[in-house]
Every structure is written in C-alpha cells, then in structure tokens.
Image: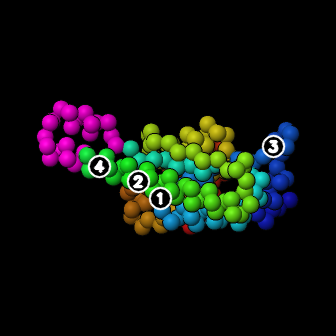
Amino acid sequence: MSYRNYSELSSHLTYGEKTTMKMLIAIDNSEYAIKVVNYVASAVKPTVKTTLFSVLPTMSSNLEKMEKDLQQPLFSEKVVELRWMVDEEKKKAKSKIEECRTILRNAGFSDDTVEVKMQDKVVGIARDIIAEAGKGKYDTIVVGRRGLSATATFVLGSVSNKIVQNIKDCTVWIVE
C-alpha cells in the first residue's frame, strides 16, 4: 500500500496495538524553523504527538575558568559580552519556539499533542537532537536545511547531514 503523506501513513501504522506517532521537530533561531513547522502543520494530522525541540547555546566552562585564572580586565570584559550574547540567543530561541507552537495551534494541534523541550547544548546540536530522539523514542525527526555551499558542508558538515548519517531507528524529514 502506498501513502500520499505522513498523515495517511501515521493513521495506518501499528506497533502491536495502535499507538500515536511521535514527531520531534528540531527548532533553531532561523526562519527555516518557521518553514519546517509550517510544512509539518500542513502535512501532518493534528493528532500526531509533536515535540518542538531546541538546543540552546552555552558558554564553555573553560572560558569561565580562564577568566578566573587570568584575571585580565580585557578578557573578563569579552567573557561578559559573550555571556550576554548567549543569553540573548536563548531569549530568541524561546521566542521562536513559542512562534512555532502558535503555528501548530492555529493548524488545529492541541496543547495535549504539542510539547516544548529546550535544553542547553551538551555535546553538539546534531548529537543532542539524536540523543533526544532516542530517549523519547520518536518515530520521526524533522529538521530544516539551510543550504550551505558544497564546500562548507564538506568542511563543517551540517546538522541535518549529521543527523541523517548517525540516526538509528528513526525516519528523518529534511525541509528545505
């Protein structure tokens, strides 16, 4: 049997007894996050359990230690600036994830089917997303693709690329 979209597939899949599909939507501060959520809102039934997941930026604890050890005013000033920048990025992430939640609500998703999870970066964005997917036993991960140049993708990799290459037992949707 073939399916036209994820909604049809999710309504026909069973695992022993019928269960609700679980979808992890990776959100960052970009406009691509909005594209991803708009796509999910249009392609998925509002009964699918969705989790909006954001990995928040952190400041290396090594910088804090170096600041104390060096006791250099200029370095301390830069650490304060960096701390402020990280806090600003966290505020933007919270705002973006609320905007995404509103899109899903407007598409008919209830508060019972939409969960928001935010966590500080632990090992890396892609690896943190993969860890959450495993921990939460999600059926599908949805990520955006920013369109790095071929050279940048080769040298730096991309979050979506790393997820596709390393995920186990989970479908990955990449939204461009």
In front: label 1 or label 3: 1
User: Alpha carbon of mark 3 to alpha carbon of mark 4: how far?
Assistant: 45 Å
In front: label 3 or label 4: 4
The secondary structure that dominates the magenta segment is helix
Q: Which residues are magenta?
A: 59-79
Please report whichever mark, 3 or 4, sits nearer to the chain's N-terminal start.
3
Q: Name the mark on residue 89.
A: 2
User: Alpha carbon of mark 1 to alpha carbon of mark 3: how far?
Assistant: 32 Å
Q: Residue 67, image x and y in percent?
A: 21, 37
Is 167 within the magenta? no
The reply to whether dot 1 and dot 3 touch (C-beta < 8 Å) is no
Is 74 within the magenta? yes
Query: Dot 4: within a 10 Å radius of its alpha carbon, few (fewer than 14), some, or many (20 or more) residues?
Result: some
Q: Quickly name the residue at label 1.
A: 29
Identify residue type, mark 2. Glu
Q: Residue placed at 33% from the left, 40% from the top? A: 60
Q: Quickly name the residue at label 3.
A: 19
Identify residue type, mark 4. Leu
User: Alpha carbon of mark 4 to alpha carbon of mark 2: how far?
Assistant: 11 Å
Q: Name the mark on residue 82.
A: 4
